[in-house]
Image (spheres, rainbow, N blue to C red):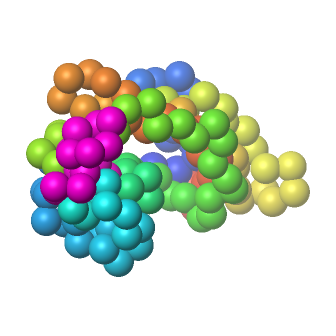
């Protein structure tokens, strides 16, 4: 597995981490387990809501983006997530949507207390096939420096 260490991270470089097409059965199965709401699991009931059909739970959307982030190559040598900031869901995710994740490192620095570690902050933007943003957030991570 190729790893991207702190030294390899390019500040302000825009990247596409990958894409994923949302299977309806997967979305409904996730919702039945983790966010059982009619708008996520019942096609007829969901038609009565303003979106006119089934939409993904927010936790599903976040999980999908994290999966694509973790499958990117080379994989970031992340040690720990420090936090998520400014999490927004501007548009819903629907079955059949293809979501593409865009990322940009907006901050990179050495740790003040641990010599083998650094801190990065990324801005992520997940967009559907029509270019509509479905999830944006900033994520901070502790990242390993290249072993000597």
Asked if one can make out residue 95 in the rendered structure from this viewpoint, the answer is yes
The span picked out in magenta is: 43-56
Q: Position of residue 28 (x, y in %)?
A: 22, 65
**Quadrant showing the N terminus:** bottom left
Whether residue 50 is in magenta: the answer is yes
- Relative to 29, 6 lies left or right: right
Whether residue 16 is in magenta: the answer is no
Most foreground residue, 145 or 25? 25
Q: Position of residue 23 (x, y in %)?
A: 13, 57
Most foreground residue, 13 or 4? 13
- Relative to 49, 95 lies left or right: left
- Relative to 53, 84 lies left or right: right
Q: Position of residue 77 (x, y in %)?
A: 51, 58
Asked if one can make out residue 125 in the rendered structure from this viewpoint, the answer is no
**Identity of the residue drawn at 31% across and 61% down:** 38
**Identity of the residue drawn at 31% across and 24% down:** 132
**Identity of the residue drawn at 75% across and 44% down:** 110
């Amino acid at each position: 597995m190729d790893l991207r260490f702190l030294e390899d991270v390019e500040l302000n470089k825009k990247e596409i981490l990958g894409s994923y097409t949302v299977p309806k059965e997967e979305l409904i199965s996730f919702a039945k387990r983790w966010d059982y709401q009619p708008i996520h699991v019942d096609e007829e009931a969901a038609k009565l809501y303003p979106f006119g059909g089934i939409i993904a739970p927010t936790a599903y959307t976040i999980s999908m983006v994290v999966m694509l982030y973790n499958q990117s190559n080379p994989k970031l040598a992340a040690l720990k997530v420090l936090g998520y900031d400014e999490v927004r869901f501007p548009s819903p995710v629907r079955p059949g949507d293809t979501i593409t994740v865009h990322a940009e490192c907006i901050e990179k620095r050495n740790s003040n207390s641990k010599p083998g570690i650094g801190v990065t902050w990324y801005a992520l933007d997940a967009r559907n096939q029509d270019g509509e943003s479905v999830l944006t957030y900033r994520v901070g991570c502790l990242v390993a420096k290249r072993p000597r």
